[in-house]
Image (cartoon, grey):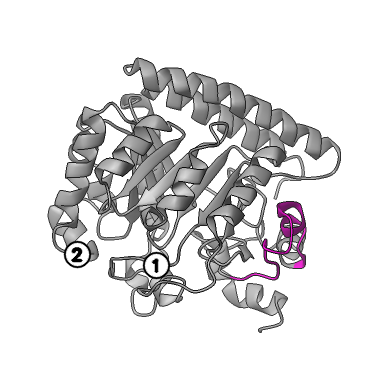
Amino acid sequence: MNDSFDLQEYLSRGVEDLMRDVVRATLKDPRESAFMLRFAASAAAASKKREAAEKAGEHIPSFLIASITSRCNLHCAGCYSRCSRATVDAEPADQLTRGEWLRIFTEAEELGISFILLAGGEPMLRRDVIEAAGNLPGVMFPVFTNGTFMDERYLELFDRCRNLVPVMSIEGDRVRTDARRGEGVYDALIRGMDELSRRGLAFGASVTVTTENVREVTSEAFLKTLSDRGCKAAIFVEYVPVAGSGGLAPGDEEREYLAGRLSRLREERPEMIYISFPGDEKASGGCVAAGRGFFHINSHGGAEPCPFSPYSDVNVRTASLREALRSPLFTALRDGNVLTGDHEGGCVLYEKRELVESLLGRG
């Protein structure tokens, strides 16, 4: 990694760019745009908190991923979370309570974390936690959902609490989406998008990118379908393989194609925001997990480097977020050239999972 690379400056600039794009994407909706302008002020104040912490020798990331439940109603083909047993069918035991999550969210806001991504399992199974998040307007909570629980109560909640932004998981057209997620899921997603749009509510789309769909999900036709329905952001997540599915994981050719398409789309279709994960790690000085740019808390409170690196040596039930960020595992990953070292591409922590396990004494 280039020794002159300034991670804090890179992340702050990224948040500023993101907020500018969000405001631009919502200009046609006065109510949504007004909220986004207020939130932009909150995000700027949070950035100053992180900069002050950096000067004091403490690095605070901009993002937190919170998997608020390990339960899900779908069985998506090749789901990494299910294969790693992080997602189950039954009501999970010993999950963090609404009060515990609210304490975590509040603590994150006090540290200067601006964005908390709510994931699962299926996060909309935890209405109690999402309602609690709605009470913190200074934090943006994208809710990554399969879209099958978009009822009237949720629509009213999203209308009342504009800091809650549903991000709907879709794989492409009806055939491809239903093939992976189950029959009827595509139609449920489209109904939900149309209803959100009818009410003037901002929403995004999350797309799992594979070798099979990379060209379809970055095509003009697919993105026009989303844009015409009022979608404000498209988040492209590279597929992380499970046993027997390695051929679906994007390689260098697909990543290069995706990067080129997103660069062009940002210029030609500015009505939407385009984000890729993990994206070009070289541009960010390496992987930004383990607290460099974000970290993950699972539904039982374990602080993990990333949802695709489900290893933990500290639990936020008994530790503060500050303590979690200073955990031996996170520290070893950040200081040991694991995140910034050479790798073949894609998710570095997945590629180096045996090394991560060895740092926990499992190797």
Up the image or down, 349 lies above or below 266; here it is below
> What residue would you read off at disc 2?
182
Write down the quadrant of residue 50 in the picture. top right
> What residue would you read off at disc 1?
71
Q: Nearer the viewer, residue 341 or 179?
A: 179
Toward the bottom, the furthest residue is 363
Give the magenta-colored segment's residue range: 311-328
Name the residue type under label 1.
Arg
Q: From this viewpoint, is residue 311 visible?
A: yes
Image position, residue 113 (x, y; %): 63, 40
Left or right: where 347 falls relative to 147: right
Which residue is drawn at the image coordinates 71% and 75% (left, top)? Answer: 359
- Magenta-colored segment: predominant secondary structure: loop
Q: Earlier in the sequence, mark 2 or mark 1?
A: 1
Which residue is drawn at the image coordinates 49% and 52% (left, top)? Answer: 278
Write down the quadrant of residue 61 in the picture. top right
Quarter placement of the C terminus: bottom right
Name the residue type under label 2.
Gly
Up the image or down, 214 lies above or below 261; here it is below
Image position, residue 312 (x, y; %): 65, 69
Counting labels gives 2
Which residue is drawn at the image coordinates 50% and 30% (left, top)? Answer: 18
Which residue is drawn at the image coordinates 64% and 36% (left, top)? Answer: 10
